């Protein structure tokens, strides 16, 4: 088991390195850099070659790309995320100011998403073909077919503009956190749930229906085990353990979903800062943020693998056979 864990951690490190390399390479392919953006923002017209050369030297952009990438990697491994090329502030400080709001949004959504997906999936799959199964399946499929930004626009139009129940944008006072106005979280969390919930619900439902149809469950019924006892002790654990990875995929999907939701609701999270950094060609900020977001996704899947091994004897057996 330890060897399996070490292999997965090594593979995760390789993926993170590949992400960092790809992001850096894409920035190198752009037709402008942070020096061009800074001089253009100063309103001096088209910057001269001398001005660009001087500013690139000041920002360290005149050095060879491999050296800049290697320096960033060494600094990142030491916990130094670098400095923003635009503001000059440490990237860690800029991230800390925005990350707390994004993490709050993600945690609330995940805390509602996971039990709701498991509950609805088990409810629908316990009796395949029943009215409850049809209602849940059709609703999940219909919602999953709608893009997240369309769902968000409809929520704003109905809840905020028509019913005037909640604010249309998630504005908070300068220097304050989102907890000072918890009502600004309701629409973003709802939008995220509607975008991410249908797929894991359908997966849990499918796994539950498969477990219900197995010989193991039929044999248990013949032996007098039935009702709630059969469902809680035999059906639900097997269905949930087989649905761990779809649930992990929904959690990882929070990264992309939050980017859309924060932009739509003007939520003071990380996405607005990241989009501004991309437009400003601020590669230290974009690169560090991209690797951290990739680490979150990889960590979620790794945790799902370990949890699956913990709850599933069959998964442990398969891993042991592969390692032989």
Image: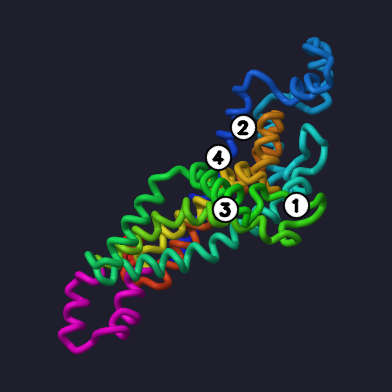
Depth-wise, is mark 1 or mark 2 nearer the camera? 1
SS majority, magenta: helix
Residue beneath the point at 69% across and 61% down? 182
Q: Are marks 3 and 2 in contact (CB under 8 Å)?
A: no
Q: Quadrant of the C terminus?
A: bottom left
* Res 7 visible: no
The image shows residue 259 at horizontal and vertical percentages of: 59, 44
Which quadrant of the view contains residue 230? bottom left
Residue drawn at (68%, 50%) of the image: 170
53 is higher (above) or lower (below) than 28: above
Circle 2 residue: 24
- Disc with the residue nearer the chain's start (1 vs 2): 2
Disc on the earlier residue, 4 or 3: 4
Q: Mark 1 and mark 3: span between their CA atoms?
A: 19 Å
In the image, which is nearer the foreground, mark 4 or mark 3?
3
Question: Is residue 315 magenta-colored?
Answer: no
In this picture, which residue range is highlighted in magenta? Answer: 211-240
């Amino acid at each position: 088991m330890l060897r399996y864990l070490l292999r997965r951690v090594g593979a995760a490190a390789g993926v993170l390195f590949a992400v960092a390399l790809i992001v850096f390479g894409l920035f190198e392919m752009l037709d402008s850099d942070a020096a061009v953006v800074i001089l253009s923002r100063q309103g001096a017209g088209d910057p001269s070659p001398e001005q660009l050369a001087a500013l690139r030297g000041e920002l360290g952009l005149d050095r060879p790309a491999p050296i800049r990438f290697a320096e960033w990697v060494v600094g990142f491994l030491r916990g130094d995320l670098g400095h923003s090329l635009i503001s000059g502030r440490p990237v860690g400080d800029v991230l800390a100011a925005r990350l707390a709001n994004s993490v709050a949004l993600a945690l609330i959504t995940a805390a509602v998403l996971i039990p709701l997906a498991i509950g609805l999936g088990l409810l629908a799959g316990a009796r395949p073909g029943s009215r409850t199964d049809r209602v849940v399946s059709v609703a999940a499929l219909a919602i999953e077919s709608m893009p997240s930004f369309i769902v968000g626009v409809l929520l704003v139009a109905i809840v905020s503009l028509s019913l005037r129940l909640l604010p249309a944008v998630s504005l908070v006072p300068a220097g304050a956190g989102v907890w000072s106005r918890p009502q600004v979280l309701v629409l973003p969390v709802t939008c995220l749930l509607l975008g991410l919930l249908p797929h894991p619900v359908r997966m849990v439902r499918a796994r539950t229906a498969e477990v219900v149809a197995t010989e193991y469950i039929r044999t248990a019924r013949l032996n007098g085990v039935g009702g709630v006892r059969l469902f809680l002790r035999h059906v639900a654990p097997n269905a949930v353990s087989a649905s761990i990875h779809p649930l992990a995929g929904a959690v990882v999907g929070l990264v992309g979903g939050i980017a859309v939701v924060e932009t739509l609701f003007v939520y003071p999270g990380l996405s607005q800062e990241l989009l501004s950094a991309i437009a400003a060609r601020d590669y230290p900020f974009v690169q560090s943020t991209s690797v951290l977001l990739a680490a979150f996704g990889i960590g979620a899947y790794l945790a799902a693998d370990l949890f699956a091994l913990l709850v599933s004897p069959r998964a442990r057996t398969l891993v042991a056979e592969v390692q032989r």
